[in-house]
Image: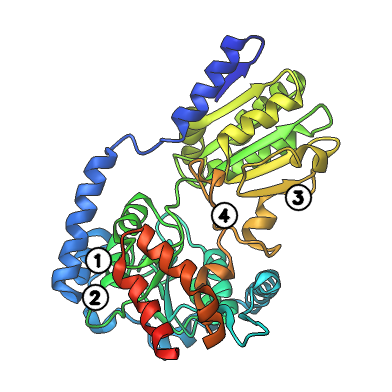
Amino acid sequence: MKFFDIQSDADLEEVRAFILKSADRGSEEESPEERRNAVATLIEEVRQRGDEAVAEFTRRFDGVDLEPSQFELTAEEIDSAWNAVPKPVIAMLERAHENIRSFHAKHLRESWEEHLPDGSMYGQRITPVENAGVYVPGGKAFYPSSVLMNIAPARVAGVREIIMVSPPSFEGSIYPAVVAAARIAGATRIFRVGGAQAVAALAYGTEHIPQVVKITGPGNAYVTAAKAMVRGIVDIDSEAGPSEVVVIADKTANPNHVAAELLAQAEHDEEALCILFSSCREVAEKTLARVEERMKVLSRSAIIEKALSRFGAIVVTPDLETAVSLTNLCAPEHLSVQTEYAPRVADKVTHAGAIMLGAMTPVAVGDYYAGPNHILPTMRRARYSSPLTAEDFRKVTNVMFFSKERLHRDAHDIEEMARLEGLEAHAESVTVRIKDVN
């Protein structure tokens, strides 16, 4: 990990440069342009050849030979997966699902109308999207939590058809706990296809995979690139980047707790961003020692070591105000505030996907169980975007009705506005009605 000790403006600029450079982090093996070109070719193949192309790419990238008729899990296969999951795990998934469902149900907007004395009306009609496609990763690990975080909000929003796709990376199918989570959350159909080919299939539709109007869910760099390219054909939640965590710590923080947060995000993938801003040098040094000790024995030590060597940093700041300022620059996916007065510090943070307050709130409670969504903006997008919510699966239709009296009253202003913009036919569409009334 890099170690910075800010004692001058030059030191501060060095840290700022590291943060901004890290926002564009990516694989060492392939350039973004090469990836985009490869994904564009793949998407076009799926658009043109449908199921045939999906089957071909599944053989090439996943090593699984499937006929198109085998893409979708049957009811018997879903039952078999369900029965393979231990009952305590099922109960745990059900409890987590209820927390997530309950949280997302609290902030739904409702349709509304306002009727005016002259008989006119205006309002908004809120309706769910027709259907949604949910992508669940399945390469380096399996993520039942992502199933719940994607499908529960869609169900709360009222989406009737939810199509889940996930790579066939568990014995040629999908990990049983992922399937069980999909049943609990309410997926209507489940397909064992993944990668950019699954995104393309959801966007354009194939003979066996239905076209959807919204695609959500995180994935690898190829999945993210595919989602970006089909945006406009369908809506997407976001272009998810590698995992991120920032920890703000003062002298009261426990270095073991701080190190645990850095290690937890680093084990996601080699491009994870993990930064500590500490106003106490002793805490910073002890955290570094603990990280170096623990990462040697954790099961995903190779991934952790690579992530921390490239995008890990411990920064000693002159005060908490500097830590907050740098955090806002970073706009992290996850922020852990481990300070004496955590809410006061967090109140000054304007850019973060999710904030965990205090020593007893590890990021994992948000990842899995508390209820708020773990699908969060990354790569500094928390400056302008938000976590996934049920509202992301709904759309607004504006509704209005003008009475004869109201149109007659406002006709002049509307006609003048139209003529100001040089749109005579717009003005005439009002004038003709006033003449007919008179």
Query: What residue does disc 4 label?
Result: 386
Q: State how far apart marks 4 and 1 are (Cα).
A: 33 Å
Q: In terms of sequence position, does the residue under pointer 3 or pointer 4 come before the other?
A: 3
Residue 361's disc number = 3
Give yes or no for contact between labels 2 and 1 (Cβ–Cβ under 8 Å). yes
Taking the spot 57% from the left edge, 79% from the top edge, the residue there is 122
Quarter of the image with the C terminus is bottom left
Q: Amino acid at mark 4?
A: Ser
Q: State how far apart marks 3 and 4 are (Cα).
A: 21 Å
The residue mark sitting in front, 2 or 3, is: 3
Quarter of the image with the N terminus is top right
Neighbourhood count class around disc 3 (C-alpha, 10 Å): few under 14, some 14–19, many 20 upward: some
Residue 37, percent across and down?
20, 48
Neighbourhood count class around disc 2 (C-alpha, 10 Å): few under 14, some 14–19, many 20 upward: some
Residue 144, percent across and down?
54, 67
Q: State how far apart marks 2 and 3 are (Cα).
A: 43 Å
Query: What residue does disc 1 label?
Result: 58
Q: Is residue 96 above or below residue 255?
A: below
Give yes or no for contact between labels 3 and 1 (Cβ–Cβ under 8 Å). no
Q: Nearer the viewer, residue 308 or 299?
A: 308
Q: Amino acid at mark 1?
A: Thr
Query: What residue does disc 2 label?
Result: 66
Q: Can see residue 108? A: yes
The residue mark sitting in front, 4 or 1, is: 4
Is 5 on the left or on the right of 162, as rendered?
Answer: right
